[in-house]
Amino acid sequence: MGELVAAGLDLVVSRRCGGCDAQGPGLCQSCRAALFGPICRREDQAPRLVPAEGSASLPVWAGAWYSGPVRQAITAWKRLGQRELDHDMCHAVRRVASAIGPTLDQVMTKIGQDELWVTPIPSSRRNQWRRPGPLTWLLAQAVAAALVRSGIGASALQLLRRRAGSKDQAGQTLRGRMIGRDGTTLVRGNPAAPVLLVDDVLTTGATLLDAERALAGAGTATLGAIVLAVTPKGHGHGRRFQAGPATMG
């Protein structure tokens, strides 16, 4: 039903750039450049992912800040059902996956694994009404395909689900986001390979941390995460996304 509604909207709504409203479908060249920025680790921007002294953080890679035209484009994709943005969003995470492929390969060799499962963070139900499945599943499939092309034995699998009654994070305060995810992620079955998580936006890191803990409880290691964009620490949207090393620290 959601697909039919979205198709009808395509006929009556004049499509514009999802990032700046310029005339034309998809993203314009300028907004695409913002989405396809330098690929770097950015877990240091998420309060919940900053480790205690002496412990390792969960690596999170991205190529854009969640601000300006990138924020508007992701909102149009998630909330407004602009399906013409699928290609650009998937290409964005494929770029990241291709860049970190050699790093993941080294880590898998080190831990004696030859298979990697790419797992999406479950989307809220309200973000699925225009789609046959979660948007993060679309991203996870794109990541897995890019890793396979890099020579890694990767498969996209939906290993996680939300506990019934868990609330959507959108619109919550920073504190609400940080405490609202604890224990809301559940693991399907018994994962037999290390996992790479995929999500759309990194804010506090609460969602990724909850997923990592759930997978650890099921006996599965999480090697890191790929996201479309990162909310700058302190919501300082004016900062430029600086290039950094795409390495497991």
Image: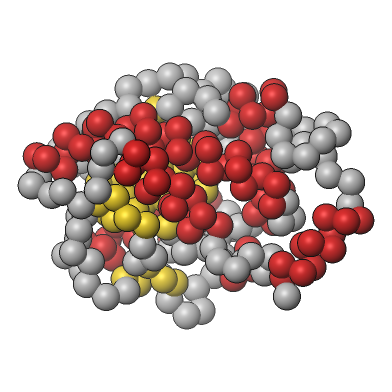
Residue 205 in view: no
Name the spot of residue 204 as percent of width and height, x first: 45, 47
Q: Residue at x 55, y 66 (%)?
A: 133
Q: Residue at x 32, y 55 (%)?
A: 155
Q: Nearer the viewer, residue 213 or 7?
A: 7
Image quadrant occupied by the N terminus: bottom right
Q: Residue at x 42, y 34 (%)?
A: 96
Q: Residue at x 60, y 57 (%)?
A: 170
Please, is residue 82 above or below residue 93 in the view?
A: below
Q: Along the horizontal axis of the image, is 12 left or right of 39?
A: right
Q: Along the horizontal axis of the image, is 147 left or right of 169?
A: left
Image quadrant occupied by the C terminus: top left
Q: Along the horizontal axis of the image, is 70 left or right of 154?
A: right
Please, is residue 244 above or below residue 159 in the view?
A: above
Please, is residue 195 above or below residue 97 in the view?
A: below
User: Based on the displayed image, in which of its 4 quarters is residue 35 positioned?
Assistant: top right
Q: Along the horizontal axis of the image, is 133 left or right of 116?
A: right
Name the spot of residue 156 as percent of width and height, x first: 37, 57
User: Based on the displayed image, in which of its 4 quarters is residue 130 positioned?
Assistant: bottom right
Name the spot of residue 241 as percent of width and height, x first: 51, 23
Please, is residue 145 above or below residue 126 in the view?
A: above
Numbered marks: total: 0
